[in-house]
Image (cartoon, coloured by chain):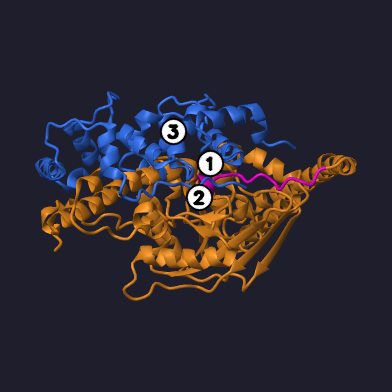
Chain colours: A orange, B blue
Amino acid sequence: MSSPGKLNSSSSELDLDRPNLEDYLPSGASIQQEPHGKLRLRDLLDISPTLTEAAGAIIDDSFTRCFKSNPPEPWNWNVYLFPLWCFGVVVRYFILFPARVLVLTIGWIIFLSSFIPVHFLLKGHDKLRKNLERCLVELICSFFVASWTGVVKYHGPRPSMRPKQVFVANHTSMIDFIILEQMTAFAVIMQKHPGWVGLLQSTILESVGCIWFNRSEAKDREIVAKKLRDHVLGVDNNPLLIFPEGTCVNNHYTVMFKKGAFELGCSVCPVAIKYNKIFVDAFWNSKKQSFTMHLLQLMTSWAVVCDVWYLEPQNIRPGESPIEFAERVRDIISTRAGLKKVPWDGYLKYSRPSPKHRERKQQSFAESMLRRLEEK
Amino acid sequence: MGNTSSMLTQYDIEEVQDHCNHTFSQQEIVSLYQRFCQLDRSGGGFISADEFLSVPEFAVNPLSQRLLKMLYGLNFKEFVAFLSAFSSRATLQQKIEFIFKVYDSDCNGKVAFSDMLDVLRDLTGQFISEQQREQVLTHVLEESGYTKDSLLSISDFMKTLCNSDLKMEVEVPVD
């Protein structure tokens, strides 16, 4: 009945490196039951399913929704609330904010005045130096969290240090890292940032074993992959933290998990982070805001409220591919944090989707057409 | 505390509604306007091809290049009119006219064999040979009483498509 032999099977390994789009998208073509019966002119002329999909994507699409900063819920505004709101503004900007700047400054003074001597004077005592530096990085992160009155609730057992494990978490903002770091000195894999953040990365964070890369440099991938492998095998290294989405998502959705973290051959410990938006939206929209502005926004809000769950470690099952494993872990995190899953690669913020997705649609249309041509 | 929708006055909304034959409700037009502004990142009053293609679900659509030509330089009013064929209030005739326009790329009111072949090529890509495509198309045309040289008009499209149940509806999310 079917005649797949007639097709050029050049793309037999379509999309092996990513989850199946059609599993997620309620697209017109996949909902409709497979048309059958003899092929007629009207079946060829009727391009409505494809057009409907296109129009649906123009009107609303799951990818753009992942990176949309959500406006705060508007108040039921009235005259009586206005003085109250003004009072709030005065408190936030003229009392809380300066106090927080002060806290942060004190934090930095304490941190730098101990970190620099520890770093340079304890050259001979590697173990001691490592432990002290670890504590100090945790300390400065606590100061950061305090500077936005971070109300963080940690659930589950704290991470322990042991080889052959890697932590993965969903990613909303760089403050995810700070929030996790104040409890445990993780070594993180992160995009190299410009400006003062980059300076911090290459000086202080390097000492806890963080690894930097440049998203746009292809050759960085291999180097990072090698560094990753070496890092997880080290006994005394800080636990490794990876944000497998590779980009900040607005904490309502999760985008595709990159498989890198899941093919290291070690246990994967999922961490789910959910922000409560009651005072401020913690999503860092890096295309609209610099990180400094993002921090200022957090420091002038009432508080940053969030929940962190350390979930049960997962291992790759026999016969499971790294991609399936990544999807399973994403499932666990999304369920815990109440996020919706979309199939897109977050890097599509910076590039266009691969033509493979289109080819897949073309292939299924061609197959169905040829099959019906044979039917009588 | 206003939001962006307040930039459309009641007059604007009614004008747009008239332009699209009242296929969208006022709330839907406000939603569409927010979406239009979201996609028009450069704020030029129209959505560029690059901005459309930044929506991956649109970029992977086999007909996206063809639709982009129709969407080129549309302002908000024309944008809504373009989408009106996908409203649940649009008539079957409006929907078929839209499909016809997709085929009729040179806008001469006639769809030739080559136009149909172009669309079929977009839909099937490299998975069928050019020769096979021509065969299939000639075959179904002849079965319906046309030939390879027939020029199909809008009424031919009506006749062919009016009996099939077109499911060409997209819901505009309203909050």
User: In the image, which is nearer the foreground, mark 2 or mark 3?
Assistant: 3
Element type at mark 1:
loop
- As for residue B144 lying within the magenta part, the answer is no
Q: Chain of mark 2?
A: A
Task: Identify which amino acid the numbered label 2 is placed on.
Answer: Met
Badges 2 and 1: C-beta atoms under 8 Å apart? yes
Q: Chain of mark 1?
A: A
How busy is the neighbourhood of tag 3: few (under 14 within 10 Å), some, or many (20 plus)? some
Marks 1 and 3, Cα distance to the nearest angstrom?
42 Å
Residues behind callouts 2 and 1 on a single chain: yes
Q: Which residue is mark 2?
A: A190
Element type at mark 3:
helix
Q: Which residue is mark 3?
A: B82
Secondary structure that dominates the magenta span: loop
Image quarter of residue A229: bottom left
Residue B83, x across and y down, in percent: 45, 37
Q: Is residue A343 visible?
A: yes
Q: Which residues are magenta?
A: A64-77
Marks 2 and 1, Cα distance to the nearest angstrom?
9 Å
Query: For this view, does B63 lie left or right of residue A24?
Result: left
Residue at 56% from the left image edge and 61% from the top image edge: A126
Establish if A133 lies above or below B66.
below
Residue at 69% from the left image edge and 48% from the top image edge: A112
Q: Which residue is mark 1?
A: A193
Residue A14, x across and y down, in percent: 26, 54
